[in-house]
Amino acid sequence: MINYARQNSEQKPDVSPPSAEEHIAPAPRVSVQAFCETLETAAAVQSAGEDRRLGKAHLKIQMGGMAAAIEAYRSAPTPNVIILETEGRNDVLAGLDQLATVCDAGTRVIVIGRLNDVALYRELVRRGVSDYVIAPVSTIDIVRSVCNLFSAPEAKAVGRIIAVVGAKGGVGASTVAHNVAWTIARDLTLDSVVIDLDLAFGTASLDFNQDPLQGIANAIFQPDRPDSALMERLLAKCTDRLSLLAAPAALDRVYDFGAEAFDAVFDTLRMTTPCIVLDIPHQWSGWTKRALVSADDILVVAEPDLANLRNTKNILNTLKGARPNDRPPLYCLNQVGLPKRPEIDVRGFVKAVESPPLAVIPFDSRLFGTAANNGQMIAEVSRFHRTTKIFQQMAQRLTGRTETKKRQGSLLEPIIRRLRAR
């Protein structure tokens, strides 16, 4: 009846959002039916169905527990996943035996029970149960249990999407996105892809000194669903571990998209790429909101002025409301300390937004201008600059990785460092 099982009988319900180290991959288009005994569990399952990671799943909830499930499937086909809430030990084992007689092959069963009993867990595994979760359950317990049925444990690190968007136009969100992605690939040795979603005015190809003939537009306007082979052909290689899906940056057509226009591209890349960084243009449409809400982590880039403060607060509050079971979105302050510009100080910005920034990036026209004109990243222009260190810290925080690879130092490095200091 079931394909495999995962032990969860020793865990206690986790009511907090997943940590930065935990990555729960979205579930595919599957049907899920839950048979609950209590209203509390039904509410948790209902809330899980509204989570972005179960956005493609079709969820149906009924009361009545095991007895209702057995009765329902006497005359109806079983879904991909059945969630069963049970009360006692003997009832669940006998009920599962009955359910097996009416259950289709390949259906996976998640049991929610109140007994923390290893012997019971072993019996459930022997009968083919995929997961056993201790009640009371939270929303994230249900999300985690269903999603993990469709992702192998060794593949959990694959497919993390980081979305970067500016609170206002011209705040340097693309520059931040590209430098963070480059740092993730180089310092964290994580294979990464940058997707430039500003099809009309994107700058990723300029920043990475690339001139690809194909890119994101070829995938979007493809008549068939893009597959891994197509995506591999469209990617431009920036470094050994970093690839680019570039924007055409041309005005020969109007780029109007539906809300789900980019879903197939993201889903395809998730299967092969550990880290995907979305460079999202500053606009509010169905597809930009969907891209932000469906991302694993979100970074809003802002400058320290009133308009950016208002927009940052609105974006953060909107995304928090749309993603109640996720880590909260983050923001950073960019171009801080611009000469002769009146600014809101960092302390005032933090007080208004009610959360500290991920990073504060100081204004440096020479450093950033040189990098932009040369098609280089900040670390390539000045390896030991403090801004390079800031991007390293941002990359670590966004990916949940705390260690960077150790580079082999040159014998001349101490001498060069002293000369630069002078």
Image (cartoon, rainbow, N blue to C red):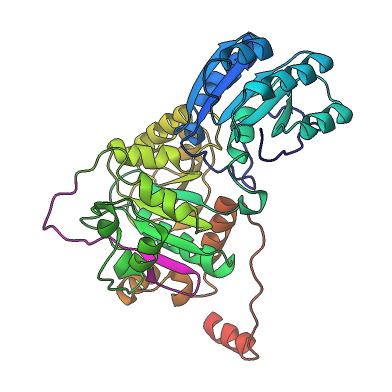
Q: How many marks?
A: 0
Q: Which residue does the image show at 52% across and 38% down from the upper left?
A: 27
- Asked whether the viewer can see residue 11, the reply is no
Q: Nearer the viewer, residue 262 or 163?
A: 262
Q: Nearer the viewer, residue 336 or 144?
A: 144
**Residue 210: x and y, percent?**
32, 73
Residue situated furthest left in the rendering: 252
Left or right, 341 with respect to 382, comes to: left
**Residue 225: x and y, percent?**
33, 50
Left or right, 352 with respect to 307, comes to: right
Residue 200 lies, with reference to residue 347, above or below; the image says: below
Secondary structure that dominates the magenta span: loop
Q: Nearer the viewer, residue 122 or 75?
A: 75
- Inspect the magenta stretch and tell me whether residue 105 lies in it: no
Q: Which residue does the image show at 53% across and 36% down from the upper left?
A: 328
**Residue 21: x and y, percent?**
64, 48
**Residue 85: x and y, percent?**
68, 17
Residue 415 lies, with reference to residue 126, above or below; the image says: below
Name the quadrant containing residue 137: top right
Looking at the rendered image, the quarter that the C terminus falls into is bottom right
Q: Which residue does the image show at 83% across and 29% down from the upper left?
A: 123
Looking at the rendered image, the quarter that the N terminus falls into is top right
Q: Which residue does the image show at 31% across and 53% down from the upper left?
A: 197
- Inspect the magenta stretch and tell me whether residue 237 lies in it: yes
- Asked whether the viewer can see residue 122, the reply is yes
Question: Magenta residues, as a range?
Answer: 236-255
